Structure formats: C-alpha cells, structure tokens
Amino acid sequence: MSNVLVTGGAGYIGSHACKALKAAGFTPVTYDNLVTGWKDSVKFGPFEQGELSDRSRLDAVFAQYQPVAVMHFAALSQVGEAMSEPGRYWRNNVEGSLTLIEAATAAGCLNFVFSSTCATYGEHDNVVLDEGTPQEPLNAYGASKRAVEDILRDFGAAYGLKSVIFRYFNVAGADPEGEVGEHHRPETHLIPVMLEAIDGKRPALTINGTDYDTPDGTCIRDYVHVMDLVDAHVLGLKWLQDGKESRVFNLGTGKGFSVREVIDASGAVTNREVPYSEGPRRAGDATKLVSGSTRAAAELGWTPDRSTMPQMIADAWRWHQNGHYEG
Ligand SMILES: NC(=O)c1ccc[n+]([C@@H]2O[C@H](COP(=O)([O-])OP(=O)(O)OC[C@H]3O[C@@H](n4cnc5c(N)ncnc54)[C@H](O)[C@@H]3O)[C@@H](O)[C@H]2O)c1
C-alpha cells in the first residue's frame, strides 16, 4: 500500500484525514510532536514522533517510508496566540514548513497537500471570497499560512513540487463513528467551547464582539464538516497523482452563520440552554468569512453533504459526550 506522510496526524483534522486515507487504501504515517495533538488519536497507521524543524529526523522518515505524498496539517493555529506571540508562529509554521518542504523535495516526494486557511484573505467588505481574492491577512497566523503558500509556489517553479493548497473555512463536527474527534488544547473553537459550556465543563461562552456590521452584530463564519473536509484531501491527493497542475481550492459551503445563529442551533440540537456572556471584539478577527467559490465542487467533484449546521453540531455533541483522549 502507498504511504502518505501526514504531519499533524495526531491533531483534530489530521487524525480524521488518516481515517479517510486508510479507507481510501493508503497507509497514513503520522509525523507529529504532540504539542497540541494526542497520541491516542493516531489509530490508522504508524506514528513517528518528531518536530517539523528536525531535518535529519524528517530525512530518516522519508527514507524509511518512501511516501507518495505529504499532507501537511501540522501548525499552530490560534489567532489570539498568534497576535501575542508572532515569532512563535513564524518559526513553527513557516520555518517548520520550509524544513519539511525541503526534506520532501530532497527525497523526491513531489506531491504536497497543504492546510491553508481563509484567514489568509483578511477583511474584504461585501466581497465574495474566492481563490482569486487578494490575500491580506489580519494576523500572524494567516500571514504564516500565506508565506507557506508562497514557498510552495517557489518550490513548484524551481523543483517541480506539485501542491494542492486548501484554504479551509471553519472546520467542525467529528467522525460519526466516534473513533476520533476535536480536542484542541486550549479549545478556542466556537462549537466545542459552546458544547463544554452547555455541559457545565466551562463557565460560559463569551461572544467576542456584538457590534460588528452584521444583521445581529456578531461575526459570520462558514462551517464545513471535518469528514467532508478530509474527503476533499483524498480527492486532492488523487488530483496530484493524476499528474494535474498545482491548484488552490477554498473548502467552505458558501453559507454563513453568525455566532448567535450557531448558539441557537446548538441549543436546538442538544435541547439544552447555552450559557453565554457578551465580551469585546478580539483583535485579529474579520467580520465575515464566507466562501464564494464552487471550484472544489466543479473540479474535484467535492460534495460537502454532511456540512449542515445541525449535523455538525450533532456529531460534535456525540463526540463531546462519549469520546476523549488521555495522552
Ligand atoms: N480547525 C480549523 O477550523 C482550521 C481552519 C483553517 C485551517 N486549519 C489548519 O488545519 C491544520 C490542522 O488544524 P487542527 O484544527 O487539526 O489543529 P490541531 O492543533 O488539532 O493539530 C495540529 C497538529 O500539528 C502538530 N504540530 C504542530 N506543530 C508541530 C511541529 N512543529 N512539529 C510537529 N507537529 C506539530 C500538533 O501536535 C497537532 O497534532 C492546521 O494547519 C490549521 O492551521 C484549521
């Protein structure tokens, strides 16, 4: 079976990607330093503990497994942290990715799938965010991801590295079979934070800003189910294996939900009260991030049919109640 090197395979999205890769007939080899990931979530292939910046360790892993492709999820991804510790973000996400990209290229592994983000677009009032929208990130997290996109383009031109870059919108939900799920540390994502608040595991959810220029004053985001998202990655891998050109794809549904709408939907799905308070805006947050692209559907044949708000909340709630990681 063909090996795929999955950096960040012990994290939320990477672990779901490993499950999808295994189902598609690949062997996912997780490479992760467990800074925010969980050893317990590596269930679908071998685990190699290591740092993105450790070139000799990466060289040894490429030599041992001879992967046909890299799926690169490993990153630090908290906007608040990125605003207060930008150096850590540039070092981990950019220097680390550069080391990985150099190691892949040197090993002749020239198919590369990269987790980028809609945070690379920044704030664009009333503009449909498609892959041609100018990238003007508002924070060091988005800037670090845009920089890696640039590195991939340059390595494509110089060495023939082929990449599929996915710019995710907000990822939510969990494996419906409950083998893996979302468990960030610390958790800052709206839906799991809300579920923890509903369940009394944290005091209350704070809405970060209620004076945005949106119908109810709260930020609007586009949510995509993690299982749909990782299906796109398998399609992206096949795209590269078919010899197609490097390509950027947004992964979102085109539907925006305000924070208040997600709160209401969570109350309805769980049939519980959502405890929340209203706080000030958080630096680095855009008002509205909604995908306006149909490229992934048209070109990859991607159908995000699990990405309805009730389904994402129901799957996350099931994982929240039954699943957990210890190490
Ligand atoms: N979750 C979202 O909504 C979302 C949205 C847009 C983009 N993304 C991107 O998707 C990717 C995965 O996000 P996630 O939510 O699964 O995060 P996560 O924190 O659960 O997973 C990241 C994984 O990378 C590992 N890692 C980080 N730095 C590393 C390093 N230097 N060396 C080795 N391993 C390292 C962590 O231990 C962790 O297992 C990230 O690149 C993130 O920026 C996520």
Image (spheres, grey):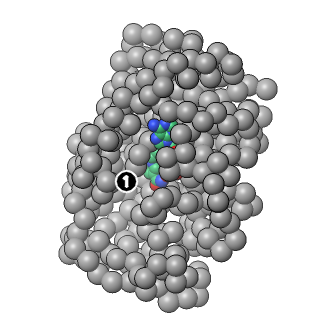
- Identify which residue, 115 or 244, lies in the foreground: 115
Residue sitting at x 32%, y 41%: 88
Question: Within 10 Å of the Cα at label 1, are there few (<14), some (14-19), or many (20+) other Cα atoms?
Answer: some
* Residue for point 40% across, 49% down: 77
* Above or below, 309 relative to 184: below
At mark 1, the secondary structure is loop
Residue position marked by numbered label 1 in the rendering = 78
Q: Is residue 14 visible?
A: no
Can you give x and y, in whole percent of width and height, for residue 264 in the image?
Answer: 46, 82
- Asked which quadrant contains residue 3, the reply is top right
15 or 170: nearer the eye? 15
**Of the residues shown, which amino acid type is indicated by label 1?**
Gln
Task: Relative to 213, say whether 247 is above or below.
Answer: above
Quadrant occupied by the C terminus? bottom right
x, y percentage for residue 72?
Answer: 52, 34
Q: Quadrant of the N terminus?
A: top right
Residue at coordinates 62% horizontally, 30% vertically from top-left? 5
